[in-house]
């Protein structure tokens, strides 16, 4: 399982530069306000919040929430992603702390954050139950986990949408496309149907209440553009 983690990290190290370019364009598009609308459904508005963006990539969510005035930290296991996340925050003129760290075993003290957010990460984690227990540990009492993800392993054979030529999937090399398919196939042997599996694991981790929104992808990805996700994402919101 640790070998899978290293393989995923190696894959994203090759995509970091192009990923930052695309996330900056997404930040400047209408998607930014759509993502904020989703967060505003769940984020407490009456007090300051310390937020951790887990698997931050090039820092899209971390920057988005920092611009809203929150104290935001982003972590990722890929050094190249952390480097580009810092660059993205600099380009946007934002003060965000980024750290190289394993999402399944962080260096944070217990009850460090009010909110944890993550996007398209949990499907890549070889020890997802361990990750949920760790995230429960570092959330403060009353804290919230907001997880946007999809059952990518179950959807790996889908190919029914014609994507635009400037879509990220069209710009990835043949080697990286093949590598992504191989990683997905390997992970599929360990995962159960989602998000049902996630709900079970979150309850077992100690979360008091878990909500699932299967319609978020329709609100975020209304049109087939360069940011379109052909796999329907869901939102899982868990309360400590």
Image (cartoon, helix red, strand yellow):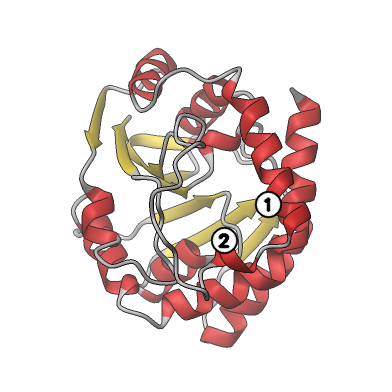
Q: Which mark is residue 39?
A: none
For image coordinates 39% across by 62% down, the residue present is: 228
Vertical arrangement, residue 200 with respect to residue 171, above or below: above
User: How many residues crowd around disc 1 within 10 Å: few (fewer than 14), some, or many (20 or more)?
Assistant: some
Q: Quadrant of the C terminus?
A: top left
Residue 101, position in %: x, y?
Answer: 70, 46
Residue 122, position in %: x, y?
Answer: 52, 36
For image coordinates 61% across by 72% down, the residue present is: 20
Residue 18, position in %: x, y?
Answer: 66, 72
Vertical arrangement, residue 163 with respect to residue 116, above or below: below
N-terminal label among 1 and 2 = 2
- Residue wearing tag 2: 169
For image coordinates 38% across by 71% down, the residue present is: 225
- 23 or 44: nearer the eye? 23
Picture quarter containing residue 79? bottom right
Is residue 175 visible in the rendered image? The answer is yes
- Residue wearing tag 1: 177
Q: What secondary structure is marked by label 1? A: helix
Vertical arrangement, residue 101 with respect to residue 193, above or below: below
Vertical arrangement, residue 43 with respect to residue 180, above or below: below
Q: Quadrant of the N terminus?
A: top right
Q: What secondary structure is marked by label 2? A: helix
- Asked if the residues shown at circle 1 and circle 2 are in contact, with their CB atoms under 8 angstroms apart, the answer is yes
- 230 or 43: nearer the eye? 230
Distance between mark 1 and mark 2 Cα atoms: 8 Å
Is residue 78 visible in the rendered image? The answer is no
């Amino acid at each position: 399982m640790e070998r899978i983690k290293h393989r995923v990290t190696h894959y994203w190290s090759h995509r970091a530069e192009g990923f930052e370019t695309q996330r900056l364009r997404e930040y400047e598009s209408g998607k930014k306000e759509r993502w904020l609308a989703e967060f505003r459904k769940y984020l407490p508005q009456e007090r300051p919040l310390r937020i951790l963006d887990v698997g931050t990539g090039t820092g899209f969510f971390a920057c988005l929430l920092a611009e809203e005035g929150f104290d935001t930290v982003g972590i990722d296991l890929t050094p190249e992603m952390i480097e580009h996340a810092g660059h993205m925050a600099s380009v946007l003129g934002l003060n965000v702390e980024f750290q190289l760290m394993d999402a399944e075993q962080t260096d944070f003290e217990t009850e460090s954050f009010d909110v944890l957010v993550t996007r398209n990460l949990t499907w890549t984690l070889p020890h997802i139950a361990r990750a949920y227990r760790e995230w429960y540990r570092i959330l403060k009492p009353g804290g919230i986990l907001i997880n946007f993800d999809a059952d990518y392993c179950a959807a790996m054979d889908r190919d029914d949408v014609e994507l635009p030529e400037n879509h990220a999937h069209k710009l990835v090399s043949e080697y990286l496309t093949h590598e992504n398919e191989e990683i997905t196939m390997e992970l599929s042997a360990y995962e159960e149907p989602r998000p049902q599996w996630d709900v079970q694991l979150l309850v077992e981790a100690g979360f008091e209440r878990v909500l699932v929104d299967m319609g978020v992808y329709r609100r975020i990805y209304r049109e087939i553009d360069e940011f379109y996700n052909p796999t329907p994402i869901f939102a899982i919101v868990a309360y400590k």
